[in-house]
Image: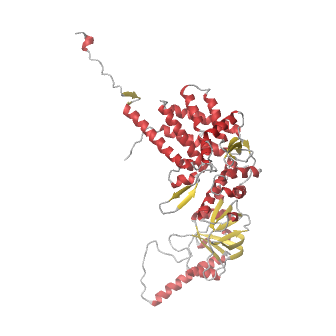
């Protein structure tokens, strides 16, 4: 037997194995990777199907029933997903642009569907991810070319953008009233016209049940949805007010631990009562000495913020008391009144007080409110008092007003507007399809799939408006191919119109943010190939 014949042949590796780096990978591992990606994609698409029908002015509302029996009726994408506890993508859009929270989820679902089909054709997830990055870079160029600059002095254009945002809300019939109000609110808190951002925490929204939507107003001052303390006939209206925001309690001190004191002598009982009375009286005298005639008392969780005895003394001194100020309101109040929170009675100094012409209690259809107006040197803040006839409309108005404020803020951050009515998505789809023909191989195929996925926005708008989606989208693409870049779906009349002519416009930031966030989410899901349980 020859040497060659005697030497055993090296065992061939099984067909189901191959080496990647230093790791032995089997067909089973590849299958697991596919299963992980597929399960993530299916789960995410399931979420998008929930909110898809609420897109656009003719979108449906969702009735959400909480565990405690509370019912919420809304078509706001961020609210729906928050209640479902599936909030991250929509929350990111809400933080960045404030509007387009439904669109970003619908876009992500469509892109995931395209991704699943591309992987089914054998294209590697990394190739798909890189191609989608090319699409985003190209999309930015197309959107900027479509946009037109807006001047913050041009209030009319800003109102139109806010109205477009409100047109898809439950309270859309009040958009002509709420849109100018939201623009005025943002312009009042804007540091200057050259500012590149605005802090919406400087706009405090106070909800009060009762009255009509038209009773909603901007108050150049402060509003509290509670009444003044009337123990012992305390005042409910103060002129030339000196206001103290206090964070200490007007009640006898308590020990850190629950203790019981047993008093067997009646004289000791009398002494305890006298000491308590003296302690509270001295505190009230110190407040009076500082010049304060209005007290805003922060809510306390350790002990009672006030007692009947302290309120009695303050009423006799003609000092108005507003209780239960929340901790998260302290910063806004301080900025508005130009005062400082007072944490200790020894810090009651005149220089820490705020001033106002009038502090008064005002009756409404459902209780009373406190208004503080005529504040000299008031900070750059404003309060929106929202009124409605029932709680469901009141809550929805609050959410809708927030979206409108965010749209105006988007125009401050990026002062360019584009057409609405799915015009940007159709133009992007058309331009990306042309761009795909300049590329080669799998990259070209992925870019074309991205372009087709964008058609979900006009298709969904048409479906929710009761129109024929195929006919509408086909006609829309033809109009854009002829150079009508502002052509979009007029859902009110069921036709295709020039969005600029019917004043359907939106900030560039809203569309760009939705597209970029949806794409980033899809690319992130593509990068996940395994689930590791850590114990």
Compared with 314, 473 (above or below) is above
Q: Position of residue 66 (x, y in %)?
A: 49, 60
Q: Which residue is drawn at 41% across and 41% down?
A: 531
Q: Please give the count of numbered marks on the rendered protein.
A: 0
Q: Quadrant of residue 3?
A: top left
Q: Is residue 504 above or below residue 223?
A: above
What is the quadrant of residue 475 in the picture? top right
Q: Where is residue 317 in the image (x, y as percent from the top left)?
A: 65, 81
| Residue at 68% from the left image edge and 34% from the top image edge | 478
Q: Quadrant of the N terminus?
A: top left
Q: Where is residue 161 in the image (x, y as percent from the top left)?
A: 70, 49
Which residue extends farthest left? 1
Q: Which residue lies furthest to the right in this view?
A: 153
**Residue 507 location in percent, x, y?**
68, 46
Q: In this view, does 39 lie to the left or right of 384?
A: left
The one nearer the camera, 15 or 120, is 120
Q: Nearer the viewer, residue 20 or 471?
A: 471
Instruction: Say which residue appears at 56% left-offset and 80% top-offset.
Output: 308
Regarding residue 281, the answer to whether it shows in the image is yes
Q: Where is residue 228, by image quadrant?
A: bottom right
Above or below residue 68? Residue 463 is above
Q: Is residue 152 visible?
A: no
């Amino acid at each position: 037997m020859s040497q060659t014949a005697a030497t055993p042949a090296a065992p061939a590796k099984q067909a189901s194995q191959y080496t990647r780096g230093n790791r032995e990978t089997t067909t089973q591992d590849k299958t697991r990777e596919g299963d992980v990606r597929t399960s993530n994609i299916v789960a995410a698409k399931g979420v998008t199907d929930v909110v898809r029908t609420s897109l656009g002015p003719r979108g449906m509302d969702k009735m959400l029933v909480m565990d405690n029996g509370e019912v919420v009726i809304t078509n706001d994408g961020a609210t729906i997903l928050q209640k479902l506890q599936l909030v991250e993508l929509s929350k990111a859009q809400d933080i960045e642009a404030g509007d387009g929270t439904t669109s970003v989820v619908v876009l992500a679902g469509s892109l995931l569907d395209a991704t699943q089909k591309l992987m089914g054709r054998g294209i590697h997830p990394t190739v798909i991810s890189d191609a989608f990055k090319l699409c985003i870079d190209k999309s930015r160029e197309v959107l900027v070319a479509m946009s037109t600059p807006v001047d913050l002095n041009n209030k009319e254009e800003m109102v139109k953008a806010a109205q477009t945002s409100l047109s898809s809300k439950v309270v859309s019939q009040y958009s002509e009233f709420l849109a100018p109000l939201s623009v005025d609110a943002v312009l009042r808190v804007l540091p200057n016209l050259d500012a590149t951002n605005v802090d919406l925490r400087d706009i405090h929204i106070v909800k009060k049940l009762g009255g009509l939507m038209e009773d909603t107003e901007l108050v150049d001052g402060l509003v509290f949805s509670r009444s003044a303390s009337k123990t012992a006939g305390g005042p409910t209206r103060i002129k030339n007010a000196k206001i103290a925001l206090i964070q200490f309690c007007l009640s006898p001190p308590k020990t850190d631990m629950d203790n019981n004191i047993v008093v067997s002598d009646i004289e000791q009982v009398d002494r305890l009562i006298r000491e308590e009375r003296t302690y509270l009286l001295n505190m009230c005298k110190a407040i009076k000495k500082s010049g304060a005639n209005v007290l805003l008392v922060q809510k306390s969780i350790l002990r009672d913020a006030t007692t009947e005895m302290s309120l009695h003394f303050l009423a006799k001194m003609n000092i108005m008391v507003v209780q239960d100020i929340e901790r998260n309101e302290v910063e806004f109040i301080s900025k508005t009144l130009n005062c400082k929170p007072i944490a200790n009675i020894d810090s009651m100094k005149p220089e820490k007080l705020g001033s106002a012409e009038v502090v008064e209690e005002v009756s409404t259809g459902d209780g009373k409110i406190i208004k503080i107006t005529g504040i000299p040197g008031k900070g750059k803040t404003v309060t929106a008092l929202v009124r409605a006839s029932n709680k469901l409309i009141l809550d929805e108005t609050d959410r809708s007003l927030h979206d409108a404020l965010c749209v105006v803020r988007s125009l401050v951050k990026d002062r360019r507007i584009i057409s609405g009515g799915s015009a940007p998505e159709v133009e992007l789809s058309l331009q990306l399809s042309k761009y795909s023909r300049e590329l080669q191989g799998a990259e070209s195929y992925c870019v074309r799939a991205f372009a087709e996925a964008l058609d979900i926005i006009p298709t969904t708008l048409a479906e929710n408006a009761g129109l024929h989606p195929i006919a509408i989208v086909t006609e829309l693409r033809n109009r854009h191919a002829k150079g009508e870049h502002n052509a979009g779906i007029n859902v009110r009349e069921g036709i295709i119109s020039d969005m600029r002519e019917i004043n359907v416009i939106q900030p560039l930031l809203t569309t760009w943010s939705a597209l970029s966030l949806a794409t980033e989410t899809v690319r992130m899901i593509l990068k996940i190939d395994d689930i590791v349980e850590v114990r």
